[in-house]
Image (cartoon, grey):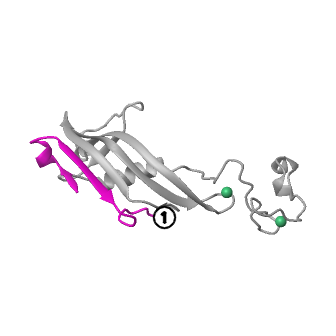
Amino acid sequence: MRITLAELELHRIIASEDFASGMLDYRDTQFRQAAPLKIDVTAELLGGEIRIHGHLATRLETSCDRCLGAVEIPVSRDFDLFYRPLETIAKEVEVEIPADELEIGFYSGDGIELAEVATEQLFLSVPMKVVCRPECRGLCPGCGVNRNLVSCACSPSPEDSPFASLEGG
Ligand SMILES: [Zn+2]
Ligand SMILES: [Zn+2]
């Protein structure tokens, strides 16, 4: 659904929407949505900005960076966002946004798609590195077996050594 300025000028909007897997554009990330994404928001006009605050929840699925096994990541995120009209950038010579200011976004046209808010917040909740568990032993660089499941006969390779980079190969 779309949160429009015209409606916000009349009253604040309380909305929720479910996005089934495949409805949101994950671009080229490795993440897959493993459950419907539910977003609940309250939107209001506040000093010329659209404030959208609420919560989103879903589960993402990706693979472990070390062993390539499937990892499911529960996502539960609160957000409090302010959107300024995009035109203000063009009008003002300089828009100064203090670094510690709350999350500020921009909207153009007559409002904001809830799907945009959901996608943006999802990207922010995606971790940079994913491991199935902290002690994951990964794949053997010698023979490729999953060392969580099998212990192979390979001798520890130089890459295994924490000092590998210091030894200079
Ligand atoms: Zn793993
Ligand atoms: Zn091996």
| Span colored in magenta | 1-28
**Residue ID for mark 1:** 28
For this rendering, which residue is in front, 42 or 95?
42
Disc 1: CA contacts within 10 A as few (<14), some (14-19) or many (>=20) = few
164 relative to 121 in the view: left or right: right
Seen at 25% across and 47% down, the residue is 86
Ligand 2 position by quadrant: bottom right
Quarter-of-image position of residue 52? top left
Q: Position of residue 45 (x, y in %)?
A: 18, 38
Seen at 69% across and 61% down, the residue is 67
134 relative to 88 in the view: left or right: right
For this rendering, which residue is in front, 167 or 33?
33
Seen at 52% across and 53% down, the residue is 73
56 relative to 92 in the view: left or right: right
Q: Name the residue at the bottom extreme.
A: 143
Q: Position of residue 154 (x, y in %)?
A: 88, 64
Q: Position of residue 139 (x, y in %)?
A: 74, 62
Q: Is residue 113 magenta?
A: no
Amino acid type of the residue tagged 1 in the rendering: Asp
Q: Position of residue 149 (x, y in %)?
A: 75, 62
Q: Name the residue at the left extreme.
A: 10
Give the structural element (helix, strand or loop) at label 1: loop
- Count the marks: 1
